[in-house]
Amino acid sequence: MASRRANNARLKSAVEFGRAEMGESSEMYQSALRAVLYAVMELTKDMDGNEVQAHLTMNIPNYYGDMTQRDLAVELADYLAKRLEELRPEEASAARVLRELIKSQRLG
């Protein structure tokens, strides 16, 4: 949580998460959600899309072997893009870019 004060409670943004929760001791370690949030953070920091995609594939176990993982990443990016449109437009835009990067990625 970014804030727990009454009337100000909200979840952390992808940028606020940064590299947190990437370690093996984290409950979110190697989850598709954490990988997508990390990719969104990288895109908001103007990192190259190819690098972001490479990191995403490394951060999601069995990304190429299990197509449901890739589909889940697309769905999560789409969900974030829709939900963040009003709250954090820059992150919503990054989530849309990520969604399209994943969908247009050549496999094989």
Image (cartoon, rainbow, N blue to C red):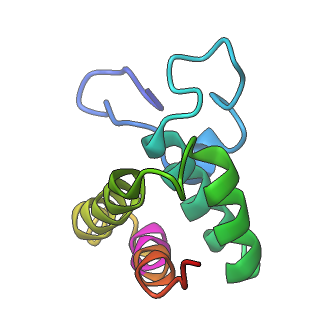
Q: Please give left or right for residue 27 compared with residue 7 in the image.
A: right
Please identify the dominant SS of the magenta region: helix
Question: 32 or 10, which is in the foreground?
Answer: 32
Q: Please give left or right for residue 23 compared with residue 40 in the image.
A: right
Boundaries of the magenta span: 91-96
Image location of residue 80, percent across then percent down: 32, 60
Q: Residue furthest top?
A: 25
Q: Quadrant of residue 64?
A: bottom right
Q: Quadrant of residue 93?
A: bottom left
The answer to whether residue 30 is above or below residue 104 is above
Task: Count the marks.
Answer: 0
Residue at 40 percent across and 75 percent down: it is: 99
Residue at 56 percent across and 46 percent down: it is: 60
Image location of residue 106, percent across then percent down: 55, 85
Residue 54 shown in magenta: no
Q: Please give left or right for residue 104 compared with residue 9 in the image.
A: right
The answer to whether residue 74 is above or below residue 48 is above
Image location of residue 75, percent across then percent down: 27, 61
Residue at 62 percent across and 71 percent down: it is: 44
Question: 14 or 71, which is in the foreground?
Answer: 71
Quadrant assignment for the C terminus: bottom right
The answer to whether residue 78 is above or below residue 106 is above
Image location of residue 1, percent across then percent down: 43, 26
Residue at 28 percent across and 72 percent down: it is: 85
